Amino acid sequence: MMERLFTKELAELIVSSRPDLNGEAGQAARSGIIDYLASGFAAEGDEGVAKLWRVVEAEGGTPVVPVVGQSRKAGFLHSARR
């Protein structure tokens, strides 16, 4: 029951928030997006990423979803678009 109340309160805070009115929040969001993109592009030749791609390829699926920083696509099973 407590978890449900927490989730409801969190959802209400998110809906009522106005990060566009807070310069610090906007800057944090921009930094986060830049960091996310830089990490994706930097990982192109990483051995750990190569292992993940081998799993993706072994599990199959139609590669239709672009992967940030990579020159290939993944299937819906491996994407956040599910």
Image: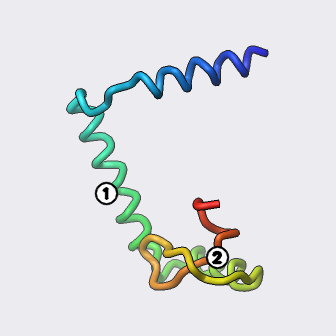
Between residues 13 and 25, which one lies in front from this camera angle? 13
Residue ID at (35%, 54%): 33
Q: Residues within 10 Å of mark 1 (few under 14, many from 20)?
A: few
Position of the C terminus by quadrant: bottom right
Kind of residue at disc 2: Gly
Task: Tell me the element at label 1.
Answer: helix
Q: At which x and y percent is residue 78?
A: 66, 69
Q: At which x and y percent is residue 22?
A: 24, 28
- Closer to the chain start, of discs 1 and 2, is 1
**Placement of 44 over or under 24, stated as above or below:** below
Say left or right for 69 vs 21: right
Q: Are marks 1 and 2 in contact (CB under 8 Å)?
A: no
Between residues 78 and 47, which one lies in front from this camera angle? 78
- Furthest residue toward left: 23
Task: Tell me the element at label 2.
Answer: loop
**Placement of 26 over or under 9, stated as above or below:** below
Which numbered disc covers residue 75? 2
Kind of residue at disc 1: Ile
Hey, which quadrant is residue 73 in on the image?
bottom right
Q: At which x and y percent is residue 55?
A: 72, 78
Hey, which quadrant is residue 1 in on the image?
top right
Which numbered disc covers residue 34? 1
Between residues 42 and 33, which one lies in front from this camera angle? 33
Residue ID at (69%, 84%): 57
Q: How many marks?
A: 2
Say left or right for 38 vs 48: left
Q: At which x and y percent is residue 72?
A: 51, 84
Residue ID at (60%, 74%): 48
**Placement of 6 over or under 42, stated as above or below:** above
